[in-house]
Image: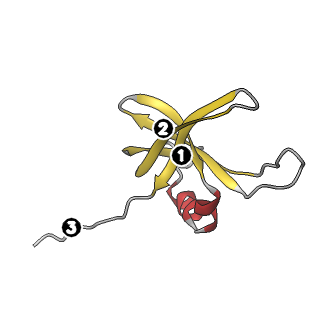
Amino acid sequence: MNIEGAITDLVKVNRTDDKGAPLPTTGEFKLHTKNPAQILSVKVSADQFNDGTYQQIEHLQSDPNGWGLKPVLLNIEYYEGANVARQMDWKGFRLHSLPTETKQVKS
């Protein structure tokens, strides 16, 4: 889904597996939306981290110490899953893609 909001609190996430081996670096950020007014936690995959998407998001991030939030348009998706062995379920939002920017030329 395409959603407009402001990006804050972008962080790199370094995790390890059950045996202590490092997993690929991912990212996470907060997306502040207006209608409906909410703050979503959005995940950035390891592939997106490596292909430069994370660095693009850094440039779209709003200044947390500034006076206002800078709106951006993102494609995000809702996901759900479960780990039966650990009796855990998870759900949330992840970044699908950054929309391509199109500029209209006035004639």
Q: Position of residue 30 (x, y in %)?
A: 56, 41
2 or 1: tag closer to the N-terminus:
2
Please name whichever residue, 44 or 34, is drawn nearer the observer in this view of the structure: 44
Q: Nearer the viewer, mark 3 or mark 1?
A: 1
Q: CA distance from mark 2 to mark 1?
A: 14 Å
Circle 2: element type = strand
The residue located at (34%, 64%) in the rendering is 101
x, y percent for residue 77: 46, 44
Marks 1 and 3: in contact by CB < 8 Å?
Answer: no
Q: Identify the mark at residue 94; answer none if there is no mark.
A: 1
Find residue 32 and name its label: 2
Query: Which amino acid lies under the numbered mark 2 shown in the image of this protein?
Result: His
Q: Tell me if mark 3 has few (under 14), some (14-19) or many (20+) residues whose alpha carbon lies within 10 angstroms of its own.
A: few
Q: Amino acid at mark 1?
A: Arg
Q: How busy is the neighbourhood of tag 2: few (under 14 within 10 Å), some, or many (20 plus)?
A: many
Q: Which residue is mark 3?
A: 104
Would you say residue 69 is visible in this rendering? no
Question: Neighbour class for label 1 at 10 Å: few (<14), some, many (≥20)?
Answer: many
